[in-house]
């Protein structure tokens, strides 16, 4: 406690009288909640700045002391997400436990819940982000539009689906895929043979290859009290199954489609009981016959997501702050955009390892772009950072963000 304005020393008579009035006599410490985060990747790292602002103490479960978030969060528990004892250690005394990545065994999360830990999102919701087959079944039961799909275990199953849906089709491992790993475009039964063999009778998800105009994502947040919020629908540009660019809002998006996709994402968050931020990734498809376009759901992520990084600078409340608010059951923040256009471009690891040095050129060339580096070693194709730019001229904004990201990764050198 510092000296009071009248100059009396700390805890002098004036302070004591004030404390007594406020009913806080004898209170010497203010407590701030600990939020436990399973995983210490870039999503946990980017949660640190808003945690600082909100007075939230993050504690991360890291497999390595040098992981992205472990570099910036002092409270680190070492251990893997499969280790229940490690999960107990990170959750001990925390107001809630949340996730930086989704591959945490749900039986462990159920055990923690039974022990009184507030797991957010809870395992019943999370399963739908972990298992693409489970998600497809649930979406179908809810009548949510998506690609034609089938569970396949054999070449025979696949041929039967191919006859219905047409070739090429898309084959997916139901669990553990990311950045297009675990997704195969198969032109014929022969093209899928190796995958079926490797799956050894475990079910795979087969989907029709959607002919989309583009890919869209809707980010929403929902708190345990049931308050929910949505950001504007964004366009995501994928190259080789990896997100390259996100444009907020999706340019030229039909108003009805935007409203429909947003309502759908909010409905999913409510019906699945999601707590925290969720990304609904999907396809914009023309309905044909000149009808209105439609939104087909591809997959869900129940945590901050690459399609929401633009919100750090581009929205009144970033997805990272909103996730903290939501999982701690605080009132949600405004999701209003701060600029006409905000564009995020991922920096993927290339030949150029000295990421920090790239600041010299990027910052000098364009003082208004914002660079986020994740403290990761460069490996080809790995997401090592991202860049955000915003303004009124979409093509100029896209070019500025792309140039900065390409320079960081060594794709351009001037
Ligand atoms: P991951 O879990 O690796 O992100 P996704 O299911 O999102 O896997 O697929 C990665 C990318 O593959 C998508 O962003 C999309 O570009 C493409 N893709 C996935 N499913 C389909 C599909 N049924 N039809 C067309 N393209 C698809």
Image: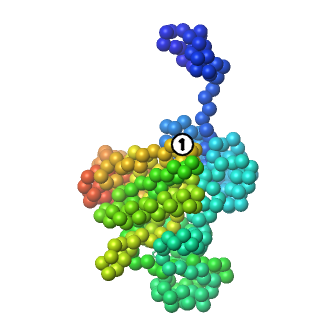
* One can see residue 374 in this view: no
Residue 200 percent coordinates (x, y): 67, 81
- Residue at horizontal 54 percent and vertical 51 percent from the top: 226
**Disc 1, SS:** loop
- Where in the figure is residue 156, as x and y percent of width and height? 60, 90
Q: Is residue 284 left or right of residue 162?
A: left
**In this rendering, is residue 3 above or below 409?**
above
User: Residue visible at 39% across and 72% down?
Assistant: 294
The image shows residue 246 at horizontal and vertical percentages of 39, 60
Considering depth in this image, is 41 or 375 the residue closer to the camera? 41
Q: Is residue 322 visible?
A: yes
Determine the residue positioned at 63% across, 46% down: 96
Q: Which residue is mark 1?
A: 330
Q: Is residue 307 above or below residue 214?
A: above
Give the image's coloring scheme.
rainbow
Q: Residue at x 45, y 45 (%)?
A: 333
Q: Is residue 350 above or below residue 143?
A: above
**Placement of the N terminus among the 4 image quadrants:** top right
Q: Is residue 83 left or right of residue 198?
A: right
| Corner quadrant of residue 104 | bottom right
């Amino acid at each position: 406690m510092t000296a009071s304005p009248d100059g009396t020393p700390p805890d002098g008579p004036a302070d004591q009288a004030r404390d007594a009035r406020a009913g806080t006599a004898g209170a010497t410490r203010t407590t701030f909640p600990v939020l436990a985060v399973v995983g210490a990747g870039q999503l946990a790292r980017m949660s640190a700045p808003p945690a600082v602002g909100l007075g939230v103490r993050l504690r991360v479960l890291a497999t390595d002391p040098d992981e992205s978030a472990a570099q910036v969060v002092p409270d680190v528990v070492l251990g893997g997400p499969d280790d229940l004892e490690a999960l107990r250690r990170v959750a001990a005394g925390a107001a809630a436990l949340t996730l930086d990545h989704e591959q945490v065994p749900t039986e462990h999360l159920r055990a923690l819940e039974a022990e009184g830990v507030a797991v957010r999102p809870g395992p019943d919701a999370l399963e739908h982000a972990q298992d693409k087959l489970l998600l497809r079944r649930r979406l179908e039961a809810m009548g949510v539009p998506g690609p034609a799909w089938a569970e396949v275990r054999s070449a025979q199953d696949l041929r039967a689906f191919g006859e219905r849906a047409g070739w090429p089709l898309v084959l997916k491992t139901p669990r553990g895929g990311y950045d297009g790993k675990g997704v195969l475009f198969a032109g014929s039964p022969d093209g899928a043979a190796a995958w079926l063999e490797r799956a050894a009778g475990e079910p795979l998800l087969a989907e029709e290859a959607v002919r989309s105009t583009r890919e869209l994502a809707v980010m929403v947040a929902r708190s345990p009290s049931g308050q929910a919020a949505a950001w504007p629908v964004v366009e995501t540009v994928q190259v080789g199954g990896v997100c390259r660019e996100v444009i907020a809002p999706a340019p030229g998006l039909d108003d009805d489609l935007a409203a429909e996709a947003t309502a759908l994402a909010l409905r999913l968050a409510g019906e699945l009981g999601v707590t925290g931020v969720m990304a609904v990734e999907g396809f914009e498809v023309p309905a044909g016959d000149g009808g209105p376009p439609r939104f087909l759901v591809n997959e869900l992520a129940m945590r901050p997501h690459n399609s929401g990084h633009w919100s750090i600078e581009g929205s009144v409340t970033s997805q990272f702050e909103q996730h903290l608010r939501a999982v701690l059951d605080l009132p949600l923040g405004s999701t209003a955009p701060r600029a006409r256009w905000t564009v995020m471009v991922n920096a993927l690891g290339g030949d150029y390892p000295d990421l920090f040095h790239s600041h010299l050129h990027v910052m000098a060339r364009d003082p208004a772009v914002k660079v986020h580096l994740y403290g990761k070693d460069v490996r080809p194709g790995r997401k090592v950072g991202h860049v955000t730019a915003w303004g009124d001229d979409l093509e100029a904004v896209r070019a500025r963000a792309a140039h900065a990201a390409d320079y960081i990764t060594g794709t351009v050198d001037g």
